[in-house]
Image (cartoon, helix red, strand yellow):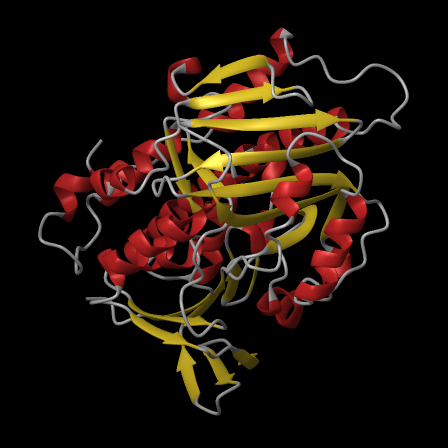
Amino acid sequence: MSGTKVLIAGASIAGPALAHWLDRWGAEVTVVERSPVLRPGGQAVDARGVTREVVRRMGLDGAVRAACTFAAGAHTVDADGNVLETFSVEDDGGDGFISEIEILRGDLSRVLYDDTRDRVEYVFGDRIAEITQDADGVDVTLAGGSRRRFDLVIGADGLHSALRAAAFGPRERFVRHLGHVLAFYTVPNEFGLDQWMLEYQEAGRSAGLRPIRDASLAVAMFSFPAVDFDVDYRDIEAQKQLLRERMDGFGWLTPRILAHIDDTPDFYLDQVAQVVMDRWSSGRVGLLGDAACSSSPMSGQGTGIALVGAYLLAGELASAGWDPATGFDAYERKMRPYVEANQEIARLHARSRDVTAHGPGPDFESEWFAELLERAINGVRLPDYADLADAGSTDATEAVAP
């Protein structure tokens, strides 16, 4: 066992996934999460291409598939509900618009937490208040008052990462707003929704309903352009009011869906944004997932970036004997082309929804876009880390071998 002590900020997807691999390679892992409990629900997230291989190497393919939404595909509809276009879960070998593995963010978070909670220390309802690093380690003070020292600290705390702000600078330096806002929340399935997602789009706005495993419920989805978005991401009441205002007069089932906005347990709204940084590490502090390189939901690959990044970050740190400079550098070299392809996909999708844009929109049928999409789904090589010291599981070598 290496004895390397690692603190991870964030217990959504990237954090517990990293904890899985760090523990497997022998580190002592602590995860601190601001929320008092795991957050349920949220948007549906997808595992495409190389991400499915990471899930398999984790030994979690069965658990993840068992928690999937079981969507058969998606229909785009007109204001009267007539189907205009259909996308099947079988399209593009399961890597299409609706992927073969589609799971609610909260359900995937639960799978990853359940997998690691017996071997990893989780601290809920707390956060990093102060960090000070030197050549040998990082001193951390939590808001609850405890003080501890770690060898490495990793920020996996999302788009609005507090650790990134503390270690790298204010969010304005790194966050790029793409001019749209997304909202998600759970509603009663009073709409006759079966296994098919429904979406209505008009003039840059959209409303949709997504099926989940519990057929009595559905996930409502909205998007609208908002170049001037300035609502505090923690002010839920202001966010609900913004959603009502921006979707006022929108057709289809929108008024009925909005009628449930005050009853939902898991309302979420935020800007569509990317994080662009020259470096994802500083000394012994590193970043992962949306905190480092958010591609935005417009890419459909945020989960892939989190899971693939966790695999590579843990593997490269362990391969480097836990030397942060060597490990972080190798992780970045392997991840950046994959991340940049996904960020470009997201920018193109955001541009395609911008009704004020001049000139033709992106050609999603072109050969160059197909090549870009392939890089965004499969454009990263997964090294075989099976020869690393295994401290977390007796069958880790078998699980990791390609």
Residue 59 visible: yes
Query: In this orientation, which residue lies closer to the viewer: 68 or 369?
Result: 68
Name, please, the residue furthest toward the left.
394
Q: Is residue 220 left or right of residue 20?
A: right
Work out which quarter of the rendered image holds the N terminus and state it. Answer: bottom left
- Residue 212 is situated, as x and y percent measured from the top left of the image, at 40, 39
Please name the residue shown 49% across and 39% down the image.
190
- Residue 295 is situated, as x and y percent measured from the top left of the image, at 61, 41
Query: In this orientation, which residue lies closer to the viewer: 82 or 353?
Result: 82
Quarter of the image holding residue 222? top right
Query: In this orientation, which residue lies closer to the viewer: 303 or 277?
Result: 303
Residue 34 lies, with reference to residue 276, above or below; the image says below
Q: Is residue 268 left or right of residue 247?
A: left
- Residue 77 is situated, as x and y percent measured from the top left of the image, at 62, 20
Name, please, the residue furthest toward the bottom.
145
> Exactly how many numbered labels are in the figure?
0
Please name the residue shown 33% across and 38% down the image.
68
- Residue 229 is situated, as x and y percent measured from the top left of the image, at 81, 52
Query: In this orientation, which residue lies closer to the viewer: 347 or 196?
Result: 196
Residue 140 lies, with reference to residue 60, above or below; the image says below
Residue 22 visible: no
Work out which quarter of the rendered image holds the C terminus and state it. Answer: top left
Please name the residue shown 21% across and 67% down the image.
119
Please name the residue shown 20% across and 43% down the image.
59
